[in-house]
Amino acid sequence: MKDRIEGLLAKIRESAANLSTEEGLEQFRIAFLSRKGSIAQLFEDLKTLSADEKPSMGKALNVLRQTAQSLLDEAVENLQREKKSGKDVLDITLPGRAQHRGHMHIVSQTIEEISDIFRRMGFSVADGPEIETDHYNFEALNFPADHPARDMQDTFFITDSHLLRTHTTPVQVRLMEKYQPPIRAIFPGKVYRNEVISARSHVQFHQIDGLFVDKGVTFADLKGTLVTFAKMYYGSSLKYRFRPSFFPFTEPSAEMDISCYLCNAKGCRVCKHTGWLEILGCGMVDPNVFSFVNVDPEEFSGYAFGIGIERTAMLRHAIDDIRLLFENDLRVNHQFN
Amino acid sequence: MQLSLNWLRTYVDLPESLEELEALLTNVGLEVESIEDRRDSFKDIVVGEVLTCEKHPNADKLSVCTVSNGADVSTVVCGAPNVAAGQKVIFAQVGAHIEKLGFTIDRRKLRGIESAGMICSSSELGLDDDHSGIAVLQPGALPGTPIARYLGFDDVILGIGITPNRGDALSHIGTARDIAAATAGELRVPTPELAECPDPEPFSIDIRDPELCPRYSGAIVRDVTVTDSPDWLRKALTAAGVRPINNVVDVTNYVMMEIGQPMHAFDLELLEGSSIVVRAAEPGETITTLDDEERRLPERALLICDAVKPVAVAGVMGGQHSAVSTSTTSILLESAHFNPSSVRRTAKMLQLSTDSSYRFERGSDPNVTLWALRRAVQLILETAGGKLRGLYDAYPSPVLEKIVALRPAFVNRILGIEISASEQRRILEALQVRILGEDDAAFQCSIPTFRSDIEREIDLVEEIARIHGYDNIPVPTRIEMNVGTRFDDQAFPARLRNLVLGFGFDEILSSSLVSRGRAGVSGEGGTVVDVLNPVSKERPSLRTSLLPSILEAIDLNIRNGMPSVRIAEIGHVFAAMEEKNFTERNMLAFAITGNAQERSWYAPGRESDFFDLKGVLHQLVEALYIDNDTIFYYDRTSTLSEHVLTLEVKGRYAGQAVEVSDAILASFDIGQPVYYAELDIDLLCEALPKRQRYVSVAKYPSMTRDLAVLVAKDILAEQITRTVQLGNPAYLKSVRVVDVFTHGSIGKDRKSVAFTMTFQADERTLTDEDINDSVDAIVSALKRELQAELRA
Ligand SMILES: [Zn+2]
């Protein structure tokens, strides 16, 4: 009996090695594994054996049956795989199965990147409404009525007292109303200007404003934070300068320029041949703003800054028309991220 | 503002190089926006004198001239009809490059006669558009003078950006003052030289509203000859960007560009009576201004009137009627101080901005009017002749210098550096701030009246900082952070966006302003908010939903040949609840259209359907650890579609998922299905669980059981799964619909629904017997509740 089992095993292995067609598989199954196949025949013969031989031979037969079955399974699987690929060899040059991948808008990317740097410097992120009141957008930020400073920001009005915010700076007033210093926050968001839409200007764009109010905050601290930001965002080798400017809500006020990275400060069309690019406006919070929110300027001081997102993104990616950013032509959006 | 370097140089010593000057001005806050160096223009082009001029023997339309450059005489063939002997002309010599025409002058024969040079028209030099003939210069022009110098082009023109607070810098002397302060240099302000007028003519000035006009100074000059200005004056004005008109008007503009005081000249003969009245306009009053426009005056606009009628809009523009012309012989010069807000309001309402209004709006110096008047009279006597017949000054309550206390320690506390008190004093005095005394560690500072922007201690801090130099304030080597002050950090929208990007949606950003018709599509409650002054009449309204933006983007991309898109947008939507009460919600919208699966080697293409959208929505909610079952409802209605899946958080509408109705799609020219979902980000944020607790995983295997039932066609899948779960059958863990089909063989009002159920116990491996009771209970519930029939 033992010899017969071993003989059959050898035969099964030999047949299994040559299985390459569906007919072959079926013949193999009938020959060895069907009810009338060779293995069934041996089980039939097992009954004639003596009681001490039965258990060991029975076990051996079971092993034989399992072996034959797994050889058959394996052959079936191989054959299916070959059929699927259509060839004997897997053509790995076929394109992979398509997956959906979303692209973040370049404005969002820029906001995220900049926010991330300020988060690392301990700033929280806050937001505010886009329909603002004249009070928050202008008055509490020390824009007197009938002052030319208001010409810097052409405004969309909703009512005589409501408007679309022209900057994200009003959020600083809302924060100082709600929280006691220290306050250390940035506020990204959409802003609106009543301007004719062209390659250079749009009725909407985005800003990130920032605010830090505490005891003993100085202009030197402002420079430290903004220089750190600029080096992290634009690279540590850049040159920078701060020059006096004017914003009603800061005093002293400044604008920060970095050396033009497009022409290596040699002068080009983009930097208007000055070698400098303006990247943000900033300054020390004006005491008048503090007085609107009942913060004592003798006890606290603070700095504020604002960065234009579209301008930053357009310079960085050589986008020459701001309208491209809000048209949502996916052939444009797909170029980023 | 445009400045002439040559002019500026008369008041203060300038740094050696242009680069240094540029850096200096920018560093004190007078940003140099442009530099135009004209010194190299028009090389080899000089003033020429036409000595003789005869007809060309071989050509009717040409002349043969001899032209002197002061040293040599050349023969020049000229085609201009107006050339004549004795003229002073623009003479381009051999070698000169005419940029506008793109060629260099060479000797060449014209009809047999060699021409050595060219007599030019002003248009050929690019000066204007006069093509009628050659430019004839003033008789006094000196032959051989480089034309650049003659035209005032031997200068450097600086374009300076002046911020709205620096009205004092809007002139050559104003800018020179800052240069002197920053370089510790000397400021040379000329003193007007004027003989006294012993017997002034009687003339009165009546200021009716001293708040709007604190001061009005005037001068009468008779026997003037109004003509073209002399070259120096024309050159100076041209360099400063002001168009020369006549000697009288040019002098008023010159003084304005010199000291910043706007002035006006009236033809005295055209004024009625011997007085000036300054008063507010009455309702309905009109005036025809210098630009020949009749303007209805806004109420409270300040007017300059003679004894009978308005003759100028104060600080904005003079009237046409009394304008100075070549027939004028007597003039009244005005040098006044007007309230900045009043001038600004009037100019805004008239939609008129002039050099004058621009300066008054930014604050002029009330105490410079007489200086300016004397200076102007002096220059008019020099250039137009005549006699001073009276100086008048109405100044009811003189404006005094403000006194502001400055603590040197406060300066250092704000700036974060140590500037000594003596250095601070030096800077203040360089800016013409007088230190009256020192007490309690503070300077008592008297602020010159030309600096109307300096009112407070902090304003002086800025003055010290900008003259000290912002770049001289050191950058600290470490940044301090506060502990424990973080508040509601807005990280959730970014988290949502990242999830949606992960599901393959491209983020878009659209204009919040849309057309009136589209603004209202799908908004939840409230009415559309319009802006009062839209840029575009087509897009005056704030969107109440992100749907119009999404559909516009889909339409655009379909037209661009990309019919299959998945896009998402995060943005605010707006509505008015009642007057001056607006709601604003931050929404996330995403949409699917076109193919969900493109045709490929491994699968045929598949069009997207509602369940692509719903699958994403469920995954999104699950990714936020929110239980899907608690926020979705199917029994709402929507204006967007009859099929709507609604989200609610705490009983409030928090979003929906729909197949957009054909009618809406048609209004956006979209001819394919669009599946659209929107979520209220803030409400969704409220539904977030505080934290996620670990639950131990099952130790024992689960068993599945499949059932198929026949039910009425209108029974929803959700009804079946809820019925299966009715009464919490023992061990049932989940149920999932796996097949739905209809076929004639099962009756046309019925459908077959197959579902698979998973059973599991926490404490042991289940057997068939364990779950038979549960399955029986489920089957009978289905029969009872839904009249379901079990399929074999
Ligand atoms: Zn550059």
Image (cartoon, helix red, strand yellow):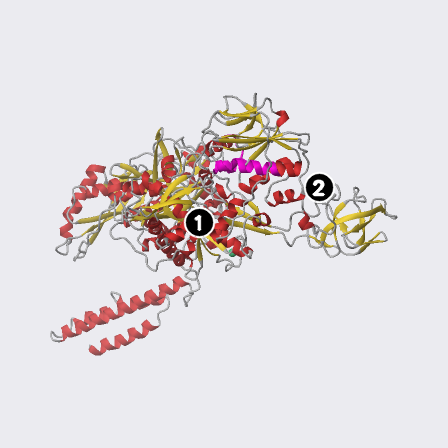
Residue B289, horizontal then vertical, whole percent: 58, 29
Residue B425, horizontal then vertical, whole percent: 40, 50
| Relative horizontal placement of residue B698, taking residue B159 as reference (left or right) | left
Q: Quadrant of residue A5?
A: bottom left
Look at the numbered disc 2 and give the secondary structure of its residue.
loop
Pick out the residue farthest to the front: B198
The residue carrying mark 2 has its beta carbon less than 8 Å from ligand 1: no
Quadrant where the image shows the N terminus of chain B: top right
In the image, residue B351 lies in the stretch drawn in magenta: yes
Q: Chain of mark 1?
A: A
- Residue labelled with disc 1: A244
Q: Amino acid at mark 1?
A: Pro
Distance between the alpha carbons at the discs numbered 1 and 2: 43 Å
- Residue labelled with disc 2: B130
What's the magenta region?
A: B349-378
Q: Callout 1: 10 Å neighbours few (<14), some, many (20+)?
A: many
Residue A279, horizontal then vertical, whole percent: 44, 52
Q: Amino acid at mark 2?
A: Asp
Pick out the residue farthest to the bottom: A3
